[in-house]
Amino acid sequence: MRRPVVFPDAAVLVGSYLRSGLADIGQPVHVGTRVPNPRPPQFVRIERIGGMQRDLVTDRPRLDVHCWGASEEDAHDLMQLVRALLADIRGWRGATAYDVAEAGGPNLLPDKETSSPRYALAVEISLRGRALAPTAGKRTAG
């Protein structure tokens, strides 16, 4: 009998990857799933906006990635770094993330509330799930 498969939280996983990757290239920027309070001049927000399970072991989430900057140039440059890192996510943490495709290229999308410079990008990433460990004392139909 097959065991149920669970998938990682795509936004959290990609956020962790980007946070680490940006720090490794000397760009330690806040990366998270919410707008930080207080708002720093530069930050990245990742949000799952859809996607579907492709098969028994593969989830294909669609993520919106938003990059804010102190200027349009800063927001653009941060987006380009994030875009390059996302293209290189394959194989990170073994086979957890093994494919990425842009679903919507970078575009200038000023923040509606603050008019702060922001660029947005949409990606789809294939993520491998993991089988749940067997549990002791399974229930029987009754």
Image: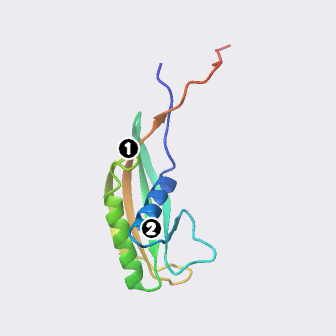
Q: Earlier in the sequence, mark 2 or mark 1?
A: 2
In the image, residue 121 lies at what x, y percent?
A: 38, 67
Do the residues under discs 2 and 1 have CB atoms within 8 angstroms? no
In the image, residue 30 lies at what x, y percent?
A: 52, 70
The answer to which image quadrant residue 122 occupies is bottom left
Task: Give the total number of marks visible in the rendering.
Answer: 2
Q: At x 55% / y 83%, what residue is drawn? A: 114
Q: At x 50% / y 26%, what residue is drawn? A: 3
Tell me the kind of residue under disc 2: Ala
Name the residue carrying label 1: 94
Tell me the kind of residue under disc 1: Gly
> In the rendered view of the protein, which quadrant contains the C terminus?
top right
Mark 1 neighbour class, 10 Å CA radius: few under 14, some 14 to 19, many 20 or more: few
Q: At x 40% / y 82%, what residue is drawn? A: 74
Looking at the rendered structure, the secondary structure element under dot 2 is helix
Q: Which of 55 and 7 is in front in this view?
A: 7
In space, the residues marked 2 and 1 are separated at their CA atoms by: 20 Å
Name the residue carrying label 2: 23
Q: At x 41% / y 79%, what residue is drawn? A: 75
